Structure formats: structure tokens, C-alpha cells
Amino acid sequence: EDRQRGRAAAQRGAGVVAAGTALAQSQKLDLGALKKESDLACAYHCDFGDPKRIMQMATNIDNHLSVYDADPFKIKIVVVAHGQGIKPFLNNLEGTPWTADPMPPEVFNRFADLAKVGVEVYLCQITFRNNKIDLAKARSDAFIKLVPSGVATVAALQGKGFAYVKVG
């Protein structure tokens, strides 16, 4: 019964993916597509929406990368965002639970800069579905990917040898 519920949830998540128009098919990952392709890899877990805390996470990532000369062949860093953590990666917050909760554009810009050295951001499809957010609200930048579940992705990455970091 649990497996049937899990399959049903995955199918609902696939329906959410099909509904979104902003993200290209190549930006949608299933858990099986996750790979550790460098000796060192780290997943930063972002389930919070406070701009200051998110900026602190970006600073920590930048510091982390600096030890490895920001070389994506030496280290791979991904940010797994779910819940309020997806806010900086939306085109706007209108029609979301966070409509009245501003997100300064410089927060996204920090991650766009980090993406230039290989940082990727994985957004949780369940967050979109549960909060009735159209996937078209997600920014379509190449470094942003959709994953079926944020927490399942964090666990899958850990299982593949990614270290885990949560800021705050």
C-alpha cells in the first residue's frame, strides 16, 4: 500500500512537471539521474525563506568553493530547495503563499553568480504541487533543475557520497 501511494505521488508530481512551461525538459531530473562526478561533493539544504539566511548560505557556498579555487572539477555543490527555500528561484511571488513576503533580487543574483562556477539548484516539485504554484513561475536558468522531492533528493545525494550542509 505504501508503494502504491508512493507511485501515485510520483505520478502526480509528473503531472505537475508536464504542466510547467518555463523549464526545459533537460532541467527535470529524476533521482536516478543524480550523480557524484567529482571527488568532493556537497548538498546545501534550503527549506527556509529568510533572505538574510539565504544570503548567508550563498556566502558559505562561496567560501566553500574558494578553498578549491572555485574549480567545478575539484568540487560539486548543489542547493536543494523546498518549502520557502524555492522563493529566490521564482520569477515572482504573486499567487504563492509568500506574496507579501518580498525576496530582494540580489538573492537570486548571488546564485546566478555561483552557477558560473558550477553550482546547481534543485527545486522540489512537491512544494509546487502542495502550494498550488504553477511551475511556470520557476526561473528557467540552466542551473535550476526540478526534482521530484527535495527531501528525497537530499537523502539520495547523501547516499551517493555528497556531504550535507544546512545553514542556520
Image: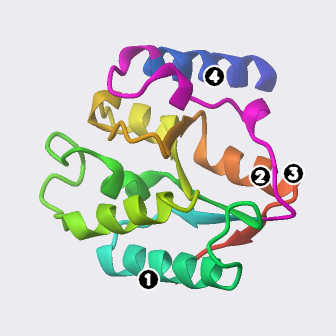
- How far apart are the two marked residues, 1 and 4, measured between alpha carbons? 33 Å
Label the magenta part by its dominant secondary structure: loop
> Hey, what amino acid is under mark 4?
Ala
Between 164 and 77, the one lying in front of the other is: 77
Secondary-structure class at tag 2? helix
In space, the residues marked 4 and 3 are separated at their CA atoms by 21 Å
* Mark sitting earlier along the chain (4/3): 4
The kind of residue on which mark 1 rests is Gln
Q: Is mark 1 on a helix, strand or loop?
A: helix
Q: Which amino acid type corresponds to the residue marked 2 in the rendered image?
A: Leu
Kindly identify the residue that appears in the image at 70 percent across and 54 percent down: 154
Q: How crowded is mark 3: few (under 14 residues within 10 Å), some or many (20 or more)?
A: some
Instruction: Answer whether residue 103 is visible to the viewer in this image.
Output: no
Q: Where does the magenta region start and end? A: 18-40
* Front: mark 4 or 3: 3
In the rendered image, the vertical position of residue 36 relative to residue 107, given as above or below: above
- Residue 102: quadrant of the picture: bottom left
Identify the image quadrant of residue 14: top right
What's the residue at 61%, 74% (across, down)? 166
Residue behind mark 2? 157
